[in-house]
Image (cartoon, rainbow, N blue to C red):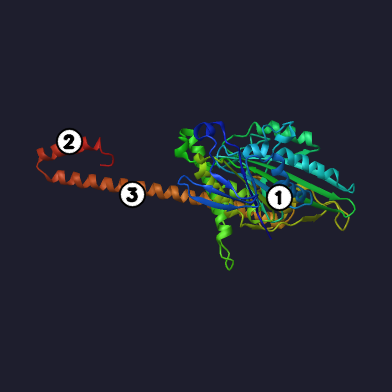
């Protein structure tokens, strides 16, 4: 078990902050791990993390301490995740990307281009008997939908869970990379498609094939640039921007709830972890509670005007520091080296094998319908085992249950509306009967009054 590595980075004061409050800051450095933050009431709060990067820190400092060890682990087939978190304008994207993904100034390069450099540098120094393949996927989570940035037509990618692969993005585009330049160019082109109001996720998958040992090891490295948290009343957001802010804050709140559940539960009993409450937490399930080595960079403003938001970010990081994960190396026998010497079935052959097995219990029409549904849903990302089939079926069941629950809720609303209309109709009938019991002229007069009021009072 290992704890999540949590570091804090304070950006320099912005020109606006200097203009409003001069060079005043709300932090007091104690050492490279500890500092004090003062809130609006000048009350001090002490925080300690694995490392603190103050305003004068360099991009290389952050990469070498926080990121490089995880890059090396990924090449050694241990999954890794790096997350940047903080309020809007706190320096997350600058830390992750730098001024530009193709930035030529070495000092300004962010985490992402340095990761690409680091991965291929490690591969070049590896043994000649090992063959590496590097693949990249890029998605964004916008308004609770996962969009493929390599294929914008895929704007609602489903998140699946496989017992053999962990969390996977069903149908997401993966491009193969051969060198640093190609990787950076691909990133630069597609990053222009991402919204600034979304969580952006970069996924590198490294497969290493040992020719001598006839086995394959894989490692996955995920970089997450979270959208900024913000106080709506402070920014004055309206319309579409307000809805975006609400969705972002909701997903970040779900992330906080997951961290609370992971760190505040009793060791004696298993607590429910609400990973499914948002697309973000579902995607980060392996990183937060699985077999991944995880690092969190909390980005903050040092200005007293942002002390409240900075404190919120720091408290989030302090809780995350107590999360424990279980990194491990994933090894599998090489698919082309079965004991009998026969090549294993391709993805399509495996798919047919599963359908053939199910045909023993289902008729031809059911099998055909099931095949079409599974293909449309993209559930068979790699159906090499019954475990994958079971996971896929569980996803279908959960989707069906959710649809049924939604239909029941809509039906309940309809029944309630009909009941209200029924009660209103009874009232009208009762009034009409009372009117009929009155002498003729009075009854006609009351009926006219009732008709007049009905045009102004719905349901009367």
Mark closest to the chain's N terminus, 3 or 2 = 3
Task: Of the two numbered discs 2 and 1 on the same chain, state the one appearing first in sequence.
Answer: 1
| Residue at 28% from the left image edge and 42% from the top image edge | 459
The N terminus - image quarter: bottom right
Q: CA distance from mark 3 to mark 2?
A: 26 Å
Q: Which residue corresponds to mark 3?
A: 419
Q: Residue at x 51, y 50 (%)?
A: 44
The picture places residue 35, in percent across and down from the top left corner, at 59, 50
Decide: few, some or many residues near mark 1? Use Cα within 10 Å; few <14, some 14-19, many ≥20: many
Spatial CA distance of label 2 from label 1 is 76 Å
Element marked by disc 3: helix
In terms of depth relative to the viewer, which is nearer, 128 or 414?
A: 128
The residue under label 1 is 80
Tell me if 229 is positioned left or right of 429 in this view: right
Which is more toward the observer, 66 or 252?
A: 66
Whether the residues at callouts 2 and 1 have beta carbons within 8 Å, the answer is: no
Q: On screen, 86 above or below 212?
A: above
Give me the disc on residue 448: 2
Q: For the view shown, which residue lies furthest in the bottom direction?
A: 268
Element under disc 1: strand
Q: Could you say whether the residue bearing mark 2 is in a helix, strand or loop?
A: helix
């Amino acid at each position: 078990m290992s704890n999540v590595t949590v570091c804090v980075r304070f950006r320099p004061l912005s020109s606006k902050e200097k203009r409003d409050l001069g060079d005043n800051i709300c932090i007091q450095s104690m050492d490279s791990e500890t500092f004090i933050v003062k809130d609006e009431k000048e009350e001090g709060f002490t925080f300690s993390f694995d490392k603190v990067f103050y305003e004068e820190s360099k991009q290389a400092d952050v990469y070498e301490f926080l990121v490089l060890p995880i890059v090396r682990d990924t090449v050694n087939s241990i999954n890794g995740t790096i997350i940047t978190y903080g309020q809007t304008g706190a320096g997350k994207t600058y830390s992750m990307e730098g001024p530009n993904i193709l930035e030529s100034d070495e000092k300004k390069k962010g985490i992402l281009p340095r990761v690409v450099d680091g991965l291929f540098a490690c591969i070049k120094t590896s043994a000649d008997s090992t063959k590496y393949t590097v693949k990249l996927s890029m998605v964004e989570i916008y308004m609770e939908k996962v969009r493929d940035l390599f294929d914008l037509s895929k704007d609602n990618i489903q998140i699946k869970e496989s017992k053999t692969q962990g969390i996977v993005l069903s149908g997401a585009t993966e491009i193969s990379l051969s060198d640093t330049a190609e990787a950076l160019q691909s990133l630069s082109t597609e990053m222009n498609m991402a919204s600034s109001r979304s969580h952006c996720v970069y996924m590198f998958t490294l497969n290493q094939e040992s020719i001598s040992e006839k086995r394959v090891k894989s490692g996955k490295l995920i970089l997450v640039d979270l959208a900024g948290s913000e106080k709506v009343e402070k920014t004055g957001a309206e319309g579409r921007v307000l809805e975006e802010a609400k969705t972002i804050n909701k997903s970040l709140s779900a992330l906080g709830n997951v961290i609370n559940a992971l760190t505040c539960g009793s060791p004696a009993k298993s607590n429910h972890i609400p990973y499914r409450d948002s697309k973000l937490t579902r995607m980060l399930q392996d990183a937060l509670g699985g077999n991944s080595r995880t690092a969190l960079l909390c980005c903050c403003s040092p200005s007293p005007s942002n002390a409240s938001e900075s404190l919120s970010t720091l408290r989030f990081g302090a809780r995350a520091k107590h999360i424990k994960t279980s990194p491990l190396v994933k090894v599998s026998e090489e698919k082309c080296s079965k004991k009998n010497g026969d090549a294993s079935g391709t993805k399509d052959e495996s798919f047919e094998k599963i359908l053939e097995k199910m045909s023993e219990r289902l008729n031809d029409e059911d099998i055909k319908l099931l095949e079409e549904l599974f293909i449309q849903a993209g559930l068979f990302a790699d159906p090499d085992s019954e475990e994958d089939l079971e996971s896929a079926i569980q996803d279908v069941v959960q989707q069906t249950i959710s649809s049924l629950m939604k239909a029941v809720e809509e039906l309940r609303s309809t029944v309630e509306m009909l009941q209200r209309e029924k009660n209103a109709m009874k009232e009208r009938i009762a009034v009409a009967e009372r009117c009929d019991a009155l002498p003729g002229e009075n009854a006609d007069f009351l009926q006219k009054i009732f008709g007049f009021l009905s045009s102004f009072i719905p349901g009367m």
